[in-house]
C-alpha cells in the first residue's frame, strides 16, 4: 500500500506534533518515579520495594544522572497502589481477576513478562522466526504429526465465503460428527482440517506441504507469502489465558470433546473485542489511507479508547508480535506511518491485530484471511490448554458474588 498524499492523515503531521507535545507535558503516564516517591505512594519500605522489583512486579531503570540509583515505572506503581487499596479479601481478589487481573489458573504453556512472551520457556518471537505451525503444535501441545494426517473420507469444506467462517463451520460439523478418537492424533487432524477449510482447498490435501504453504498457495501468488503466513501463524499460536483459551479450558473441564472445546475457542475468538478486532483494524486503516479519510485526529482526541488494533494492557511498551510482523514489511510505508502517528498521539502501540491486518492487506490475501490466520494458529494453543486442563481433573466453576 502506498502512502497517501493530499488531505490525508499522514499529511497532518505538523498538527499532530503540536498536540503530542501538549499531551506529553501533562500526561503522568510518561513520568518515572524515584525510590522515595514509590515508597511514599505505596507506604512501603525500601526492602519491600526491592522485593517487588525482584519478583517482577515493578520495573526499574538506571537513573540517567546517577547509575547507583534507579527509577521506577509509574504504571507499575499505580497498579500496585490500586491493588493495595482494593484489599486482599477473597472477594476482592476474585473481582480483580476478571479484567486483565491476576493469574487464576496454573499453566506451563505460555508466560508473558517484561514485554516478552515465551512458549514453554522459549522466546516466542525468536521461535516464530523459523518454526512452522506444526512445530508450534509439537512444542505447545506435545502433538507430533510425524505421519501424514488422515482426513475423514466423508469430509467436505464448508461452503462459506470468509475463511474464518469455514473454520467455524468445520468445527461445528466435527463437534457433532461423533468420530472415534479424542486425543493427540485427532488434534493433529483437526488442525489440518482447519488449515484446509481456511484455504478453501477443494482439491484435497497435499500431505507433504506444511500448513502455511497450503494457505499461501490458495491465497496468494506472492513469493514471500508463505514465510509471512508461517510467521503469523506461529506468533498467533498462544497467548496465555486470553478469553478464547479460558473458554476452551472451561469446556474441556466440563468434559466436552476436543472439537467441541475448540469450537468454543473459535466462537469466542470471533467476538469484535477479541479476534474480530483484526477485521475492524483492517477497515479502519483502509479508511485512514483512502482519498478522503475522516478526521481521525479529532476522533482520537475526543475518544480515550485507542483505535482498533492499538493498545495491549500486557504490553505498555509495544506488542512484540506486532513488531515482528511489521518488520516483515519494511516497505509498507502507510502502515508504519499510521502506527507511528497513533503511538505518538495516544501512547498506544499496535497489537497483533494490526499486524495480521497488515499481512492480509500487503499480501493481497482474501478478505478475512488475517482473522483466519489468527484462528488456525491459535488452535495449537487451545489444544495445549485443553489437554493441560484435562490433566487437572477439575471443573472450572467460579462462584458469583451477589449484589445486595
Image: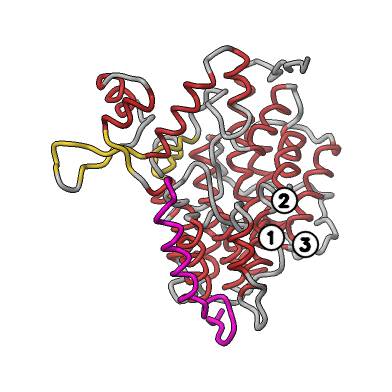
Numbered mark located on residue 205 in the image:
none
Q: Residues within 10 Å of mark 2 (few under 14, many from 20)?
A: few
Q: Read off the residue under disc 1.
A: 280
Q: Residue at x 81, y 38 (%)?
A: 175
Q: Position of residue 322 (x, y in %)?
A: 49, 57
State the residue at coordinates (40%, 33%): 77
Residue 171: quadrant of the picture? top right
**Figure label count:** 3
Which residue in the structure is indicated by mark 2?
272
x and y, in percent, of residue 72 in the image: 31, 37
Residue in the foreground of this view, choosing between 136 and 404: 404
Q: Let me know if residue 18 is in the magenta part.
A: yes
Q: CA distance from mark 3 to mark 2?
A: 16 Å
Where residue 146 sits, quadrant-wise, is: top right
Residue marked by disc 3? 162
Q: Is residue 120 above or below residue 340?
A: above
How far apart marks 2 and 1 lie (CA) works out to 8 Å
Amino acid at each position: 500500500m502506498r502512502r497517501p498524499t493530499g488531505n490525508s492523515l499522514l499529511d497532518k503531521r505538523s498538527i499532530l506534533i503540536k498536540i503530542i507535545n501538549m499531551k506529553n507535558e501533562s500526561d503522568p503516564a510518561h513520568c518515572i518515579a524515584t525510590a522515595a516517591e514509590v515508597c511514599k505512594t505505596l507506604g512501603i519500605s525500601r526492602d519491600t520495594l526491592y522485593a517487588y522489583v525482584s519478583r517482577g512486579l515493578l520495573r526499574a531503570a538506571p537513573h540517567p544522572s546517577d547509575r547507583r540509583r534507579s527509577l521506577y515505572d509509574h504504571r507499575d506503581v499505580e497498579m500496585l497502589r490500586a491493588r493495595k487499596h482494593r484489599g486482599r479479601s477473597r472477594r476482592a481478589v476474585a473481582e480483580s481477576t476478571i479484567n486483565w487481573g491476576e493469574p487464576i489458573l496454573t499453566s506451563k504453556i505460555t508466560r508473558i513478562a517484561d514485554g516478552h512472551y515465551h512458549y514453554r520457556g522459549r522466546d516466542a518471537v525468536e521461535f516464530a522466526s523459523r518454526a512452522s505451525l506444526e512445530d508450534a503444535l509439537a512444542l505447545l501441545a506435545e502433538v507430533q504429526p510425524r505421519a501424514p494426517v488422515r482426513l475423514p473420507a466423508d469430509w467436505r469444506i464448508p461452503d462459506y465465503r470468509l475463511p474464518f467462517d469455514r473454520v467455524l463451520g468445520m468445527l461445528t460439523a466435527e463437534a457433532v460428527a461423533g468420530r472415534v478418537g479424542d486425543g493427540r492424533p485427532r488434534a493433529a487432524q483437526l488442525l489440518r482440517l482447519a488449515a484446509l477449510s481456511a484455504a478453501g482447498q477443494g482439491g484435497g490435501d497435499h500431505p507433504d506441504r506444511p500448513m502455511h504453504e497450503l494457505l499461501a498457495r490458495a491465497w496468494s501468488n506472492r513469493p514471500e507469502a508463505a514465510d509471512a503466513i508461517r510467521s503469523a501463524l506461529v506468533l498467533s499460536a498462544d497467548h496465555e489465558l486470553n478469553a478464547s483459551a479460558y473458554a476452551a479450558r472451561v469446556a474441556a473441564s466440563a468434559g466436552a470433546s476436543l472439537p467441541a472445546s475448540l469450537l468454543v475457542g473459535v466462537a469466542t475468538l470471533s467476538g469484535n473485542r477479541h479476534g474480530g478486532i483484526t477485521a475492524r483494524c483492517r477497515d479502519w486503516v483502509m479508511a485512514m489511507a483512502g482519498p478522503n479519510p475522516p478526521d481521525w485526529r479529532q476522533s482520537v482526541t475526543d475518544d480515550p479508547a485507542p483505535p482498533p488494533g492499538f493498545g495491549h494492557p500486557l504490553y505498555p511498551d509495544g506488542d512484540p508480535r506486532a513488531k515482528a510482523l511489521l518488520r516483515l514489511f519494511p516497505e509498507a510505508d502507510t502502515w508504519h506511518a499510521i502506527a507511528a502517528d497513533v503511538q505518538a498521539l495516544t501512547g498506544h502501540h499496535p497489537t497483533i491485530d494490526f499486524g495480521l491486518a497488515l499481512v492480509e492487506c500487503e499480501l493481497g490475501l482474501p478478505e478475512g484471511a488475517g482473522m483466519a490466520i489468527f484462528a488456525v494458529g491459535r488452535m495449537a494453543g487451545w489444544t495445549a490448554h485443553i489437554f493441560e486442563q484435562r490433566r487437572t481433573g477439575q471443573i472450572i466453576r467460579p462462584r458469583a458474588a451477589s449484589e445486595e
